[in-house]
Amino acid sequence: MYPKPIFIKHANQVITLKGSSQQPLAREKMSDLHIIEDGAVWVEDGLIKATGKTADLAAQYQSRLEEAEIIDASGKILLPGLVDPHTHLVYAGSREEEFNMRLNGATYMDIMNNGGGIHATTSMTRKASEEELVQESLIRLDCFLKHGVTTVEAKSGYGLDWDTEHKQLLAAKKADKLHPIDVVPTFMGAHAVPAEYKENPDAFIDLVIEEMLPKVAEEKLAEFNDIFCERGVFTPEQSRKLLEAGKKFGLTPKIHADEIEPYEGAELAAEVGAISADHLLRASDNGMEMMAEKGVIGVLLPGTAFFLMAEAARGRRMIDKGVPVALSTDCNPGSSPTCSMPFMMNLACMHMGLTPAEAITAATINAAHAINRAKEIGSIEQGKKADLLLLNVPNYMQMQYHYGMNHTDTVIKNGEIVVKGGSLCCQR
Ligand code: NIG
Ligand code: FE
């Protein structure tokens, strides 16, 4: 049962991103937002039924205006709901002590190699119950929703053993059911080498391939298969083996690539036909070119570079080389403890050289492509899900210009108003 129709009228700008559902946008196409000035949208049965100039839509729906909830969007802009294509949503605990250690000179990899980092969250997540993981995830999802995000990807990877990976994926599924935000699951059994396999990481990869992948596929727990390909974690050879094995189980490859050091992760993403390569702080020019040729989406995580105080990924160069770029929070307790996609968009402009228009494309339709959802979400077009974000700014450039602020006024998810005046107004 859907609520009554919604008529959004007089938006200063409706950012439609029309015509982008087939392929991720690259190069100059990332700047073409297909804006309707003084725009309107008619929402019904959870879907976008019509878009156009306010005068035209008001005339078209004249006989039905009385039955609709009317939102006067004067002075505001309407975007597709933001899509976050890379999160580690489901975990227990927090790691502010490590943040303090890093501010005192320790590095992210030092902390991890000394049993902290991913290992610390793994031991807290192993101890948590499924219900506790669900509750922690729901709190984070509320925060995402208040920042205008209507779909998130969520990875496992804080188990490094089957029982905990399973528990995380089940928690993601429950959170998806209980919360208005759609949660798209990714299996990331190979997120770190567990202490038990420190001397023999190859045996751990074999365990993931032989014992975990078949169960993930059988229980339909995930759509994507991800790995942390990084010097000191998993090698490109181990990554290739796992990602190829996942394909046989119908899992589409994703990869944490070239985050801390150049390691030919971008090249590997192109070779295995990954849907996206993520991070890419140290990706080579050759890797970028190979990604562009194969249409691999570069999911950039500017918050991670910011929080690790590292040099950002070369987003401008990737776009100029033809890589379709998407943006994400990388929401996780170690390298990016945030749910703010708008701030990621600000950082992409300030530290990666994206323009405000490119940042919007990267956080909507290209992000939807990176999780194989571009047919349903990511643009404002007839027949797509009514996932919409009304921002309290008069034009899209101001979204980036007034940085570090949450301009969210109203969020509509599946045709239902879930945030009003910046506050949650939905039941869960
Ligand atoms: O994407 N780099 C690997 N994984 C996460 C961080 C996980 C953590 O520190 O807990 C990332 O940055
Ligand atoms: Fe990540």
Image (cartoon, rainbow, N blue to C red):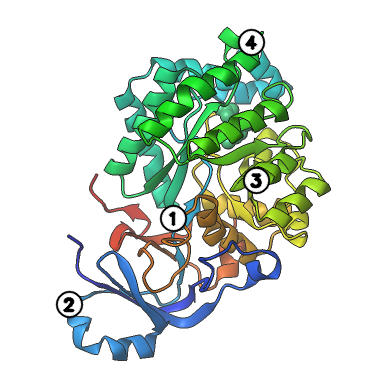
Q: Which residue is mark 3?
A: 302
In three-dimensional space, the C-alpha distance between marks 4 and 1, rounded to whole angstroms, equals: 41 Å
Which structural element holds mark 4?
A: loop
Q: Earlier in the sequence, mark 2 or mark 4?
A: 2
Residue kind at label 4, given as amino acid type: Lys
Could you say where residue 197 lies in the image, as x and y percent from the top left? Answer: 60, 10
Residue kind at label 1, given as amino acid type: Gly
In three-dimensional space, the C-alpha distance between marks 1 and 2, rounded to whole angstroms, equals: 26 Å
Q: Earlier in the sequence, mark 2 or mark 3?
A: 2
Residues at circles 2 and 3 in contact by the CB criterion of under 8 Å: no
**Residue closer to the observer: 109 or 374:** 374
Q: Which residue is mark 2?
A: 67
User: How many residues crowd around disc 3 within 10 Å: few (fewer than 14), some, or many (20 or more)?
Assistant: many
When the figure is inspected, residue 93 is found, relative to residue 41, above or below; the finding is above
Residue kind at label 2, given as amino acid type: Glu
Q: Which residue is mark 4?
A: 198
| Badge number at residue 148 | 1
Name which residue lies at 67% across and 40% down: 306
Residue farthest along the right direction in this orientation: 285
Q: In screen coordinates, is 151 left or right of 412? A: right
Observer able to see residue 111? yes
Which structural element holds mark 1?
A: loop
In three-dimensional space, the C-alpha distance between marks 1 and 3, rounded to whole angstroms, equals: 18 Å
Q: In the picture, residue 164 is in which quadrant?
A: top left
Q: Quadrant of ligand 1?
A: top right
Q: In screen coordinates, is 57 left or right of 144? A: left
Q: Which-is-in-front pick, marks 3 and 4?
A: 4
| Badge number at residue 402 | none
Residues at circles 3 and 4 in contact by the CB criterion of under 8 Å: no
